[in-house]
């Protein structure tokens, strides 16, 4: 009988219910021969997880109430397991064939006595979205959220009903010789917005953005919002080269960008606004606004640099012009399918 090796995704214990964003930061991989993306489990056949010394010391399972998922089955594990002991289980009905996330459940830090199988509701980030000016953006699923795949180009806000709203006060296109082909720069890098314009408050004011259900639509299309700090922080776990567009057209060289996440960040530069805008750092830097000003009057922005291996946060003057990406609002806080690759469960076939 064939046995498939399952790599279980484990998370640190928390006494309370965790959000999807918190789950993202806590998840880690344990050792083994396969990984979750290539694991197939067969109903009625044994599976095993071979831990390595110390894995269980730093992992403490996932509480049942932590995720909004229907528990499809619970599998009892070998009771005498220790730090180097394989975990064995047997999947039976009612688990139907399909994609599932599988988590450990614990009774204490040294007794991982079962796994629970949760049905996966796939995150659909395939449908493009358009802004108020008709510019269309492809969408990418990353860290459990749907993101616009390119920088915004809008010149008008979109009203809640989808109609065209007022003109965006500061919506600049990079224009500094020798990179002063504004049409090409608009197509390749989008527009640069002050934070005030991005969140739709008067330039230079202390007016708070309009929050609807905890999010700021700002210049984003209806049903989308300016990323929160917590959402942008999720990208910090990704290597910068996996977030950045590959090749020499959009970033200075040498670079090792591979765009593995398909986030497709490009070195859009920035603009110092006031009088004639001062443009700088095209193909060298890119920054993305978050939605809230801090107590110092600055706004955290996620920055990627052509020479840095990881993204960083910079506290930016809200009057500087930088790029904007949007996050779809209807999937916030409830879907982590892009964070954890689900296992696939199959019906047994003859001869297995």
Image (cartoon, rainbow, N blue to C red):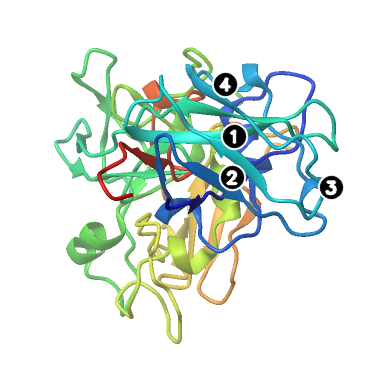
The disc placed on residue 16 is: none
Mark 2 vs mark 1, CA separation in Å? 6 Å
Q: Which mark is residue 57?
A: 3
Say what secondary structure mark 2 lies in.
loop
Tell me residue 38's x, y (percent): 41, 56
Q: Nearer the viewer, residue 188 or 146?
A: 146
Q: Which residue is mark 2?
A: 8
Q: Are marks 2 and 1 in contact (CB under 8 Å)?
A: yes
Q: How many marks?
A: 4
**In the figure, is residue 73 to the left or right of 115?**
left
Task: Tell me the distance, in whole angstroms, between the alpha carbons under discs 3 and 1.
Answer: 16 Å
Q: Quadrant of residue 96?
A: top left
Q: For the residue labelled by badge 1, is the local secondary structure a helix, a strand or a loop?
A: strand
Mark nearer the viewer, 4 or 3: 3
Mark 4 highlights which residue? 207
Q: Nearer the viewer, mark 1 or mark 4?
A: 1
Of callouts 1 and 4, which one flags the residue occurring earlier in the amino acid sequence?
A: 1
Q: Tell me which residue sits at (35%, 72%) in the image.
A: 246
């Amino acid at each position: 009988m064939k046995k498939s090796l399952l790599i279980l995704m484990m998370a640190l214990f928390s006494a309370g219910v965790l959000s999807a964003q918190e789950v993202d930061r806590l998840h880690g991989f344990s050792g083994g021969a396969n990984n979750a993306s290539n694991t197939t489990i067969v109903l009625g056949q044994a599976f095993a997880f071979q831990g390595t010394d110390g894995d269980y010391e730093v992992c403490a399972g996932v509480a049942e109430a932590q995720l909004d998922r229907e528990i499809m089955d619970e599998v009892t594990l070998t009771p005498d397991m220790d730090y180097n002991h394989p975990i064995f289980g047997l999947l039976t009905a009612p688990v139907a064939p399909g994609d599932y996330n599988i988590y450990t459940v614990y009774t204490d830090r040294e007794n991982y006595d079962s796994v629970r199988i949760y049905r996966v509701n796939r995150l659909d980030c395939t449908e493009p979205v358009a802004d108020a000016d008709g510019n269309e953006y492809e969408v990418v699923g990353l860290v459990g959220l749907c993101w616009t795949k390119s920088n915004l180009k809008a010149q008008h806000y979109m009203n809640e009903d989808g109609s065209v709203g007022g003109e965006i006060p500061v919506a600049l296109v990079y224009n500094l010789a020798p990179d002063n082909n504004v049409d090409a720069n608009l197509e390749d890098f989008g527009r640069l917005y002050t934070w005030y314009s991005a969140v739709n408050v008067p330039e230079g004011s202390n007016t708070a953005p309009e929050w609807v259900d905890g999010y700021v639509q700002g210049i984003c299309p209806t049903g989308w919002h300016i990323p929160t700090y917590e959402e942008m922080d999720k990208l910090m776990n990704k290597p910068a080269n996996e977030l950045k567009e590959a090749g020499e057209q959009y970033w200075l060289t040498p670079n090792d960008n591979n765009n593995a996440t398909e986030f497709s960040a490009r070195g859009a530069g920035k603009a110092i606004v006031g009088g004639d805008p001062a443009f700088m750092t095209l193909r060298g830097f890119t920054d993305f606004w978050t939605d809230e000003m801090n107590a110092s009057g600055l706004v955290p922005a996620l920055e990627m640099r052509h020479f840095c291996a990881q993204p960083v946060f910079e506290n930016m003057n809200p009057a500087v012009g930088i790029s904007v990406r949007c996050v779809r609002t209807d999937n916030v806080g409830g879907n982590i399918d892009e964070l954890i690759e689900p296992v696939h469960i199959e019906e047994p076939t003859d001869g297995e």
